[in-house]
Image (cartoon, rainbow, N blue to C red):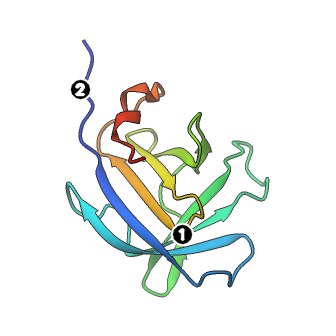
Amino acid sequence: MSTATPQPILHVFKEYNIGKFKTTRHYKIESVTNGVNQLTDIINISKDRKCAQSMPAYWLQIREGKKWKKPRLTGLFNTIKYNVFKGDIDKKRHLVLFQFSDKANTLTIYYFQNYYTTNLSNVWDFLVD
């Protein structure tokens, strides 16, 4: 018996502090659709510096108060889609897809609450072209 793919909670972020840092981009929330914000209003995405054995392409940090904190996310890993990366939260409980615009000034995060799969063919239709 297969589980139906739930509607993702969409988080749209816009970059700010453009060009201020070489390997990190900062984003502010612009909108949340299909639910409530599962992250924070401010996030940053930084390139992996090859310190973790899992070898993700990027890392996500969330802003809590005046401090940056790593969420319970595995990291952002490459997918077969251009500018789309995957990760999971809470030890493969929630699937998270990250879709960057061509210039990476807009980031759309698809948060599939209580749904995780390694077969991403079920979730590609949710991505905005």
Say what amino acid the circle numbered 1 marks.
Asn
Q: Residue furthest toward the top?
A: 1
Upstream in sequence: badge 1 or badge 2: 2
Say what amino acid the circle numbered 2 marks.
Ala
Secondary structure category for the residue under label 1: loop
- Callout 1 environment at 10 Å: few (<14), some (14 to 19), or many (20+)? some
Residue 4 is labelled as 2
Can you give x and y, in whole percent of width and height, for residue 77 in the image? 61, 44
53 to 121, vertically: above or below: below
Image point (48%, 87%), residue name = 66
Question: Where, quadrant-wise, is the N terminus in this rendering?
Answer: top left
Residue 120 is labelled as none
61 to 5, vertically: above or below: below
Q: Quadrant of residue 123?
A: top left
Can you give x and y, in whole percent of width and height, for residue 83 in the image? 58, 49
Mark 1 against mark 2, which lies toward the viewer?
1
Image point (47%, 77%), residue name = 63
85 to 28, vertically: above or below: above
Of 111 and 20, the residue lying toward us:
20
Can you give x and y, in whole percent of width and height, for residue 74 in the image? 55, 48
Q: Which residue is mark 1?
A: 105
Image point (68%, 50%), residue name = 57
Left or right: 106 as drawn, with respect to 126: right
